[in-house]
Image: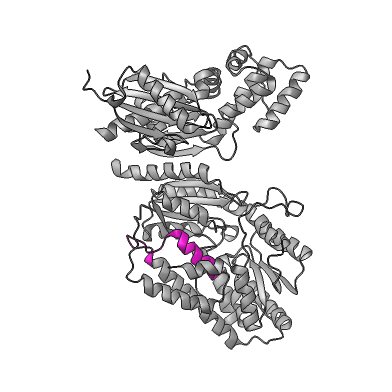
Amino acid sequence: MIEQFKQMEKKRHDYAKEWKGKNDGKVMGYFCTYVPEEILYAAGVLPVRILGSHEPQDVTEPHIFGMFCPFCRDCLAQGLKDRYKYLDGLMIAQSCLHIRQTYTSWIKHRPVEFNKFLCMPHKVQSPHAYEFLTEEYKVFKKEVEKWTGKKITDKDLEKAIEVYNENRRLMRKLYDLRKRDKPPLTGEQVMEVVMAMQMTDKAEHNKMLKDLLKKLDSYTPDRETGSRLMILGSEDDDTVFMNMVEESGATFVIDDHCTGSRYFWNEVEDGKDPLASIAARYINRVPCPSKDWEERKRIPHILNLCKEWKVDGAIIMQQKFCDPHELDFVAIKKSLEDAGIPTLFLEFDVTVPIGQFKIRVEAFLEMIGEEDLF
Amino acid sequence: MSDRGYFAGIDVGTSYIKVVIIDEKNKITGSFIDRTSPDLQKSIKNGYGKAVSSASIPNNAVKHVTATGFGRENVSFANSVVTEISSHAKGAHHYFPKKIIIVDIGGQDTKIIKIDSKGKIQGFKMNRKCAAGTGSFLEEIAYKLNIPMDEMNTLAAKSDKETALSSFCTVFASTEIITRIKEGEKIEDMVKGAFESIVRRVIEMDTLIGTVVITGGVVTYNDVILKILSKQFRKEILTPPKPQLSGAIGAALFAKEEKN
């Protein structure tokens, strides 16, 4: 069903290299989902999100402090091991310090043609954030034009916005199907679709998504749903973990991850002009915890997801040492439990100890299952 | 009596295999504890056989077998499996049928399980990625100090001093202990310090407000833990008659429920 998406994700480097050959275009590697991909796409650049490879590695220790998260190390390892040699550009929009160090170290040791640190405001709830970001985008647009030698017109931006918005709408449709009593896809499968989404040409992804939605329309999977789970927390593309949980009598029906719903939940709405509209989108999107203050807006959103997707329990995961998520954890756990949703907290590393986690997950599922007995 | 049914719970732990046989009235009629060996199948079969013979019943009198613990999937003849969180909740609730917090200190796992007055699990925590605050911590310290494991408790009981170790880390703690003994600290004070380290690690894992029941192998052989915990909390800490068997008893109770 999702083999094509999986292949794209597994062979991410081949995909990008082939795209480059076919389109004679530039490829931009990016960190974190606050990068305004629409501006790059309008310039004919392919944005690809840099993710780790979940292998033990020994190349990042001199460059990243020991208590920075495993994800930022895994990403840097990809750069230092020259797996992204084909990149023409590298950029980040400020989210957290850990991944920023990955960016800084990467451009120092593996310089690229064009690199950019985009100053995405932290306090998105400030009344000035939107205007600030719009001005930053104007500067960024000019830089991209200079780099690619191509003028980015409003029309280009509008076209890019439409492709991206369509992608978001299709993904929301796919997520809506998971509300069914028997969700047609597992959480692991959906994770593959989202990962592919972050590494491929959105127009192509849209085509594949439309096909997939058609197939799923009347499809009922041959597996028990079991407990309906939500997974939320830091960056998470650990399909091995997802599989282990879903093999133990459960299905992930919804998530709150930047490698999941947070990435595509909000569309760009019509504003003053395309750049301003894009800025509004990134200011108002479901926030990463690094930006979710002073009011914690993510909590009512998470509780609403639980309600609409009929969640029995939530697995809160985080990359070890992920400060922003550590900040949110206590409040989120309490809010979920106050709403009657049991939680299980797990700390992820580059590779996860499946045996140790399995016991916790099975006990958690037994605990949720007990509800029926009382 | 021959028509009476028996039920077995097998708790395959990381350090010990515990087997319990109960009858229809939940009375323990047989049990056996053996070290977990790399040949799990052999240890399990041997432990089960010895438990059945200690109950003086024929093999086929056991109507249902439930396995728990890290090696629960390896009990090929089990009729059902349950995680150790559920079996510990069941076992402790059997002796203390009220709202309790179970602290189980095992060989490589420490678990904190909160259950309500009906025995329903409210939540649980386990140590993560590190064996500080478990039996393995003690074994390592005993090994480094060249003291037999079964003398650690008696040694610690001799001490009335509070000697906090600065690290929960097993390796760093043993380095610290050796250094401090070299500097003149008494061995018994340092051994008690090791027990206190376990207790402090357990306490920091979760909020322990309410009735605390402690189980597991470590407390079975080292009652000094109970004394340290009671002193820390200024209240009595409960423990069932056979704390090391708690998980296996829970599994046996599950076996009986399932069969009936």
Q: Is residue A30 above or below residue A369?
A: below
Horizontal placement of A266 versus A36: left or right? left
Residue A282, how many percent across, how many down?
57, 70
How many marks do you count on the picture? 0
What is the x, y in percent for residue A343?
Answer: 45, 47
Q: Is residue A186 magenta?
A: yes
**For this view, does B47 lie left or right of residue B141?**
left
Q: Residue, x 45% and y 51% (percent of image)?
A: A245
Residue A40 in sight: no
Magenta span covers which residues? A177-198
Picture coordinates of residue B106 (x, y %)?
Answer: 51, 29
Residue B32 position by quadrant: top left
Tell me the residue at 49%/20% (across/down). Answer: B220
| Colour style of the rendered protein structure | one colour
Residue B27 shown left or right of residue A45 in the figure: left
- Above/below status of A24 relative to A265: below
Q: Position of residue A97 (x, y in %)?
A: 68, 57
Position above or below: A185 against A366 = below
Q: If the image is split into quadrants, where does the N terminus of chain A sit?
A: bottom left
Nearest the eye: A56 or A234:
A56
Location of the C terminus of chain A (image quadrant): top left
> Does residue B127 sit above or below A111 in this rendering?
above
Closer to the camera in the image, B22 or A194: B22
Identify the residue at image location x=50%, y=74%. A267
**Residue A247, visible in the rendered structure:** yes
> Which image quadrant for residue A224?
bottom left
